[in-house]
Image (cartoon, rainbow, N blue to C red):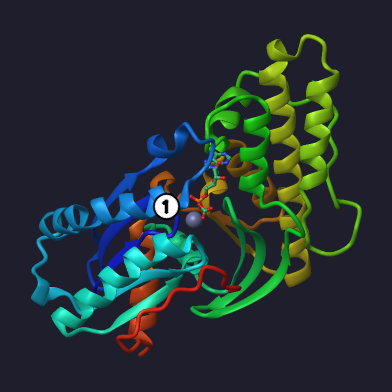
Amino acid sequence: MRVLGIETSCDETGVAVYDSERGLLAHRLYSQIELHADYGGVVPELASRDHVRKLAPLLREVMEASGTAPGDIDGIAYTSGPGLAGALMVGAVMGRTLAYAWNVPSIGVHHMEGHLLAPLLEENRPEFPFVALLVSGGHTQLLQVDGIGRYTLLGESVDDAAGEAFDKVAKMLGLDYPGGPHVARLALQGNPEAFALPRPMIDRPGLDFSFSGLKTAVRLVIENTPDYPEKTVDICASFEAAIVDTLVRKCERALKQTGMKRLVMAGGVSANVRLRAMLQDLAKRRRAQVFYPSAAFCTDNGAMIAFAGCQRLLAGQGENLAVSVRPRWPM
Ligand code: KG4
Ligand code: ZN
């Protein structure tokens, strides 16, 4: 089965063709980061307009690059939520329209299911069941994954998502949006032990997270450090160490609790080098294996949507032609 995947939930236009026999055939991504940079965050109306502008050209490129003619497509997957309503609508309308024109089924994919399954695009892919750490700009969740669509929530953030905490700290430090990669880059030059920051909720039982207190602690450090701008790299390193430590300890607890030996991480923050290294250490300690997507598929992309949609369509799921999106949608 060959599936065209479309992602437009936020500020990246992603398109891909995935073939269940031959794997990922082609993918293209257009990032709007520069468009939103001056505003310090994503402006929904500008995002929708830019998706309208870029989606059709990217579709044509991906069809050509993958050697796919319309008649070769067996189904269309598009992100139907969660995300920005107008942005989602652009992908949904394009997906449904092509499905109608080409007379193939379409399916709306949960954005976080796309992230969750992205590690399965890799050659070294995890088998079910596994524990998954989903860390993006909007979500921080630990899940037990027993198969496609068989997800049990083990814990989640009660306030900010991990990526959101990275972005807010970056903003406090005057760094560009999205700040995660900038904080991570500066952290490489800093001392992670320079400032003692809290590891929130670590002493409490359970698998929930909380990051807003850590964010406040960073603000206090900034306010109370006289030579602050010079200490930016140390603040970045100390913050990153605190958040990674918290994530890793909860992952360890989740592995213990479920007795599982496979840990999968996905979502934008899974691109973080320190998090990857620390989870590798944890895996070694617990004789477990850790899996994550290649860097291009950690953040938003069309390939993960094509893949997740393909799994759903193979399982016989699909939709009628009415277009609807779900800006808020628990998985
Ligand atoms: O998954 P994603 O592209 O979009 C959402 O679904 O939210 O994740 C974006 C998030 C942003 O908060 C960004 O700052 C963060 O992932 N991020 C990182 C890194 N790369 C992206 N955070 C920490 N370290 C990174 N290297
Ligand atoms: Zn995402």
Q: Please give the name of the residue rendered at 33% of the width and 75% of the height, measured from the top-left corner.
A: 310
Which corner quadrant holds the C terminus? Answer: bottom right
Type of amino acid at the residue the image marks with label 1:
Glu
Residue 267 position, x and y percent, is 53, 54
Vertical position of residue 198 compared to residue 282: above or below = above
Q: Is residue 271 left or right of residue 67?
A: right
Residue 95 position, x and y percent, is 27, 72
Q: Is residue 42 left or right of residue 170?
A: left
Q: Nearer the viewer, residue 92 or 265?
A: 92
Q: Please give the name of the residue rendered at 44% of the width and 39% of the height, measured from the top-left corner.
A: 36
Vertical position of residue 147 compared to residue 243: above or below = below
Vertical position of residue 319 compared to residue 265: above or below = below
Q: Residues within 10 Å of mark 1 (few under 14, many from 20)?
A: few
Which corner quadrant holds the N terminus? Answer: bottom left
- Residue labelled with disc 1: 45
Tell me if I can see residue 322 in this picture.
Answer: yes
Tell me where residue 86 sits by quadrant: bottom left
Q: Nearer the viewer, residue 3 or 229?
A: 229
Tell me if I can see residue 1 in this picture.
Answer: no
Q: Please give the name of the residue rendered at 55% of the width and 29% of the height, measured from the top-left corner.
A: 182
Give the total of numbered labels: 1
Q: Ligand 1 near label 1 (Cβ, under 8 Å)?
A: no
Q: Quadrant of ligand 1?
A: top right
Tell me where residue 277 sits by quadrant: top right
